[in-house]
Amino acid sequence: MALDPVLAEILACPQDKGPLYYVAGESMLYNPRLRRAYAVTDGIPVLLIDEATDVEAAAADALEARIDSGELVPTFQP
């Protein structure tokens, strides 16, 4: 189940309060500033700091390239 786009527009990282990037193919919300990912389970974001996972450098670089290309958009504009 995909993340509701209306919900996505108001989501922020619980740790640094900045925007996240929804990666639908991997069912996660990504924070490029901290290189951390939050799972999206059955369309529900799990925004618990303790449950976030670190994203390895190569995967983070690939995600950041997708952000730079405009493929992934932020949940909100700061």
Image: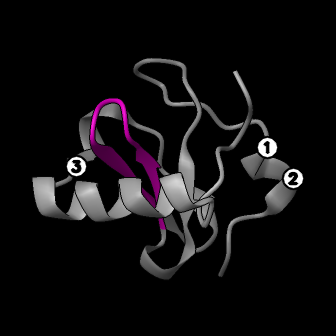
Q: How many marks?
A: 3
Amino acid beneath label 1: Glu
**Three-letter code for the amino acid on which mark 2 is drawn:** Val
Q: Which residues are magenta?
A: 28-39
Image quarter of residue 44: bottom right
The residue at the point 25 percent across, 35 percent down is 50
Horizontal side of 7 relative to 54 (left or right) equals right
Residue 64 x %, y %: 38, 53
Assign the C terminus to one quadrant of the image: top right
- Pointer 1: what residue? 9
Ranked by sequence position, the earlier of labels 1 and 3 is: 1
**Horizontal side of residue 47 vs 6, given as left or right:** left
Q: Which residue is mark 3?
A: 53
Q: Residue furthest front?
A: 69
Q: In the picture, residue 18 is in which quadrant? A: top right
Mark 3 burial class by Cα count in 10 Å: few <14, some 14-19, many 20+ = few
Residue matched to label 2: 6
Q: Is residue 31 magenta?
A: yes
